[in-house]
């Protein structure tokens, strides 16, 4: 039996309402901070799509008020489950904006696990949105994803990732992080998100690197969801390099 749900997140962003709109209501904007590859047909009644790991989810645009409100709703599944997402934009003084996210719908089996995953996931994605708008204004990034199912517990997976970055002790925001991935330029950045045991992120001058653990109930998958802003890098080649890296990552 389906379970109705609603979650809400508010975040203040160092960007104008117009900049926030471009980030949440266009394909290139969403690619710069959200999961997968995105497309949005810019009108009420239009279609939106999100493609990740070879699978595409589609939805209908249910609200289109540029600079104010954007909403989408997916079709209901055979069991009645569906998701709807609404973004509300409110401008503030000195070029700041408050963004309210409301996600609602019906979840099916294991709804508690799904709800907890959405709560933590949105914290990471909205943190990434804030970093994108603050650090890369006027630019768009290429999404890069890689996956390792059965990657062990969160402690095991993140210990391995932290070790690869040369991070010792607890992972905290502001720590230096350095990593070499075969076939890619050296990475030298700073930890800018630390939401363990679910996620953490590293920011450099040309990328936002994101690491998310799905949890035991969802297959202990270590998910890499990066956003690359360097114009001279080929996203397909970068994605393959990161997939090779996560496949070979020694996880105790």
Image: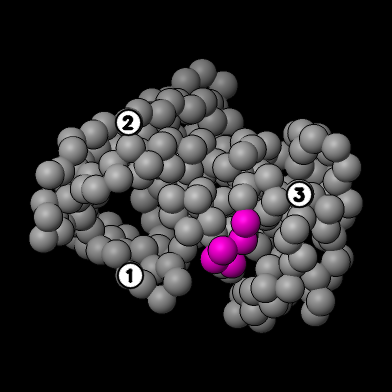
The residue carrying mark 2 is 7
Mark 2–mark 3 distance (CA, rounded to whole Å): 30 Å
Q: Secondary structure at mark 1?
A: strand
CB within 8 Å, label 2 to label 3: no
Percent across and percent down for residue 243 are 64, 74
- Of the pair 246 and 104, the residue shown nearer to us: 246
State which mark lies toward you, 1 or 3: 3
Mark 1–mark 2 distance (CA, rounded to whole Å): 23 Å
Quarter holding the C terminus is bottom right
- Of the pair 34 and 216, the residue shown nearer to us: 216
Quarter holding the N terminus is top left
Instruction: Name the residue at the top extreme.
Output: 93
Magenta: predominant secondary structure element?
loop
Q: Which mark is residue 56?
A: 1
Say whether disc 2 or disc 3 marks the residue closer to the N-terminus: 2
The residue carrying mark 3 is 159
Left/right placement of residue 121 relative to residue 3 reads right
Q: Is residue 29 visible?
A: no
Q: Quick one: label 2, few (<14), some, or many (20+) residues within 10 Å?
A: some
Q: Quick one: label 3, few (<14), some, or many (20+) residues within 10 Å?
A: many
What's drawn in magenta, residue-wise?
148-152
Say whether disc 1 or disc 2 marks the residue closer to the N-terminus: 2
């Amino acid at each position: 039996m389906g379970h109705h749900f609603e979650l809400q997140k508010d975040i203040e962003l160092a960007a104008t309402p117009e900049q926030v709109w471009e980030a949440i209501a266009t394909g290139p904007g969403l690619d710069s901070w959200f999961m997968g590859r995105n497309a949005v047909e810019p009108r009420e009644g239009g279609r939106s799509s999100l493609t990740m790991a070879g699978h595409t989810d589609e939805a209908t645009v249910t609200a289109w008020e540029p600079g104010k409100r954007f909403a989408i709703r997916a079709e209901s599944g055979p069991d009645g489950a569906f998701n709807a997402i609404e973004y509300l934009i409110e401008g503030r003084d000195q070029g700041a904006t408050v963004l309210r996210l409301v996600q609602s719908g019906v979840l099916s089996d294991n709804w508690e696990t799904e709800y907890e995953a959405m709560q933590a996931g949105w914290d990471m994605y909205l943190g990434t949105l804030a970093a994108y708008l603050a650090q890369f204004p006027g630019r768009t990034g290429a999404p890069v994803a890689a996956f390792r199912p059965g990657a062990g517990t969160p402690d095991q997976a993140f210990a391995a990732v932290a070790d690869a970055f040369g991070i010792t002790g607890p992972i905290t925001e502001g720590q230096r992080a350095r990593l070499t991935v075969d076939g890619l330029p050296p990475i030298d950045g700073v930890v800018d998100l630390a939401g363990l045991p679910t996620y953490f992120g590293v920011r450099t001058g040309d990328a936002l690197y994101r690491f998310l653990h799905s949890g035991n109930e969802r297959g202990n998958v270590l998910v890499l969801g990066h956003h690359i802003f360097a114009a001279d890098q080929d996203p397909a080649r970068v994605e393959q390099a990161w997939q090779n890296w996560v496949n070979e990552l020694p996880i105790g």
